[in-house]
Amino acid sequence: MSVKVSIPSAFRRHTEGLDSYDCAASDLNELLDGLANRFPELKPHLRDEQGKVRRFLNIYVNDEDIRFLDKDYKFADGDEVTLVPSIAGG
Amino acid sequence: MNSVRYELRCRECQTAWGNQPISFCQNCFAPLEVAYDLAAIKPEISRDKIASRATNLWRYKELLPLPEQYDASLPVGFTPLVKASNLGETFRTRSLYLKNDSVCFPTLSFKDRVVAVALTQARAFGFEVVSCSSTGNLANSVAAQAARGGFKACVFIPSDLEPAKILGTQVYGATIVRIDGNYDHVNRLCSQIADKHRWGFVNVNLRPYYAEGSKTVGYEIAEQLGWRLPDNVVVPMAGGSLIGKINKAFRELIELGLVESKHVKFFGAQATGCSPISAAVKAGRNEIEPQKPKTIARSLAIGNPADGFYAARMISGSGGWSEDVSDPEIVDGIALLAESEGIFTETAGGVTVGCAEKLYAQGRISPEETTVLCITGNGLKTTDALEGRFETSEPLAPKLAAFEEFLERELHGVVAAGGVR
């Protein structure tokens, strides 16, 4: 089981320059916990103080905004997760 | 502050980022907005000084994020503010105005304003290629103004846009990339491209500058009302930026002493088939739940609006409201505006008129107060929305007898009113 996370350039100063990260997370919570453990400086940028995903961060699974998927969506092998700043367009 | 007296600042953590092509705070991902040194600007700006300048958006240059050198030769903006007596009669009000950006130069939508400002910065930052994610109007404007300015233009659109909006981009020689997906897919892709390629995306990496161009709608409304603010403004919402920028414009004018302080209520208008901001306001929340757009108002079909949170918060905070209308109501709104005021607007304008009708009927807008509806685009770009609404008549023979017969058959009322010589 492998899930690939694409990391936007604004985050890369917290990820030793890595633009992607492979993990075996089964759901979003595990994925964010894994990222925060591996890259502690990234942690505050992923979730707010209440543990909610930050308002200005969009998360996509393959081509779908994760908010359109089941609340406890389980990743499938080969899923690609993309983190994208939400401030664009309009 | 540098010598140009404005800089980017994070809306949340207030970190200053100088002037560079970025749209979000590199610390917290929140949006960046242009902040001005209004205290330094105040002694240098006055109603008379503005009135002495050419009637286009460059007359508000002190309040726009313009580089020291820029080309102000394109007369963008300063569209008519029309008193709408006939439509007002329908809504039972005597103080209704239309800010008519359906005749904005050069491409007949309010997007000409934002693009004009964005391209001054694209030039200053040295971009050769300008781009955008667009629901149509923005692509038209980027393509046209890039052609004139000598930029290469490459724009991204959802594949199902109205043919007139696609043609109205291609004609300027722009490269158009149709994406198999909705606007939100296009937008995400553009964020990723802007992250990788050094292109000037007007609504991605140039977005803070671009969005400031929308303030000129607010400055013009105030100036055209005789340097006073209206009581209510009704604004169509896609990404939710325009409504916030009109509010910012009004607040700046108050702070600069150019208008008297006034509490203005803001009303948002969306299509029911894509109403994430309206749904938030109605539910009493600011957080946006994204939607999958399904509406003929394609220019407003943004299911995940970047400024949705701020728009919902500002509307509720102003004591305003947000409404939404169905596709048939949008078409009725287009027809109502055309038949009452002789203005042919696109689907977004139908949304605004339809929502305004509801807001008056609900008593949320008082007929005693001065209200401005923002008409942001031109009906000639979305004629497909009216397909089937009008019959095509059989041609008549070019003979007077044939006309007399037609007159008898179809036009009794006109004969009675006009008489016969």
Image (spheres, coloured by chain):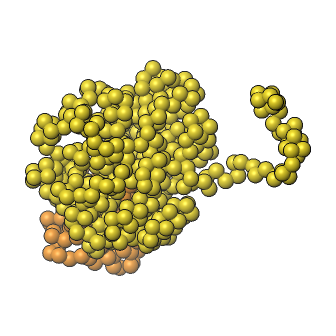
Horizontally, residue B389 falls left or right of residue B65, namely right
| Side of B402 where B53 appears, left or right | left
Q: Position of residue B237 (x, y in %)?
A: 42, 46
In the picture, which chain is orange?
A
Q: Nearer the viewer, residue B148 or B127?
A: B148
Residue shown at the point (33%, 33%) measured from the top left: B222
Where residue A61 appears, as percent x and y from the top left, is 39, 68
- Residue B139 lies left or right of residue B395; in this view the side is left
Say which of B90 and B354 sits in front: B90
In the figure, residue A34 lies in which quadrant?
Answer: bottom left
Nearest the viewer among B34 and B183 is: B34
Q: Residue A10: image x %, image y %?
A: 21, 66
Q: Residue at x 62, y 37 (%)?
A: B339
> Taking the image as drawn, is residue A2 in sight?
yes
Depth check, front residue: A59 or B363: B363
Q: Among all residues in the image, which is located at the extreme top? A: B368
Residue B297 position within the rendered picture, expressed as x and y whole percent measured from the top left: 53, 51
Q: Is residue A26 in sight in this rendering? A: no
Q: Which chain is yellow?
A: B
Give the quarter of the figure containing the C terminus of chain B. top right
Quick check: B95 above or below B129? above
Residue at (14%, 57%) from the top-left corner?
B18
Which residue corresponds to the image point at 47% horizontal and 34% vertical from the top-left? B82
